Image: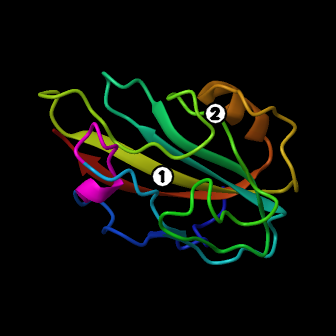
Amino acid sequence: MTEKLLQLQVTGYKNGDRIPAKYATVTGGGDNVSIGFKWQSLPAAQSYALLFDDKHPIANNWVHWLIVDIPLDVTEISEGESRKNMPKGNRELITSWGKAEYDGPQPPVGSGNHEYVATLYALDIPKLNIGENNSRDEFLKAINGHIITNESWSGYFSR
């Protein structure tokens, strides 16, 4: 891996802070607004992929959002854009919720703070050869050997 050049930022909370409730599912006490991301373009990349998952042991890397084939010229996904106004050419894949769209935090009541991590991958290929319904492990296998660099941003949420 090279040094971090993407300068990933989440537009709604600071790295390591509590995730505002509006990003949680309605059942989780929020409005299920998809999180916004910004990053610096990496000229060596041919595309980007974004994984947002829950690292808590109970959640077992539960995938809340998975986007692939983000074009090289895209450096932002605006808040609230899942399934509405996503960058042209990308694909939102099926998450652990069983839908090809963002579904925010909804940790079990009383399970404590869950760490949610967004990881942006800069890839050396323009498109991933995977279908819409792939597991997190299949996604990671598909990008293996194609990652130029990646950068993560974390936040915490509990109910």
In the rendered view, tell whether residue 36 sits above or below residue 22. below
Crowd around label 2: few <14 · some 14–19 · many ≥20 (10 Å): many
Query: What kind of element bears circle 2?
Result: loop
The percent coordinates of residue 38 (x first, y second) are 54, 73
Amino acid of disc 1: Ala
In the rendered view, tell whether residue 154 sits above or below residue 73. above
The percent coordinates of residue 126 (x first, y second) are 88, 56
The quadrant the C terminus occupies is: top left
Residue lying at 58% horizontally and 34% vertically, measured from the top left: 99
Q: Is residue 71 left or right of residue 83?
A: right
Q: Quadrant of residue 60?
A: top left
**Part of the protein shown in magenta:** 20-29
Q: Quadrant of residue 82?
A: bottom right
Predominant SS along the magenta part? loop
Q: Which labelled disc corresponds to residue 118? A: 1
Q: Which labelled disc corresponds to residue 94? A: 2
Is 27 magenta? The answer is yes
Query: What kind of element bears circle 1?
Result: strand
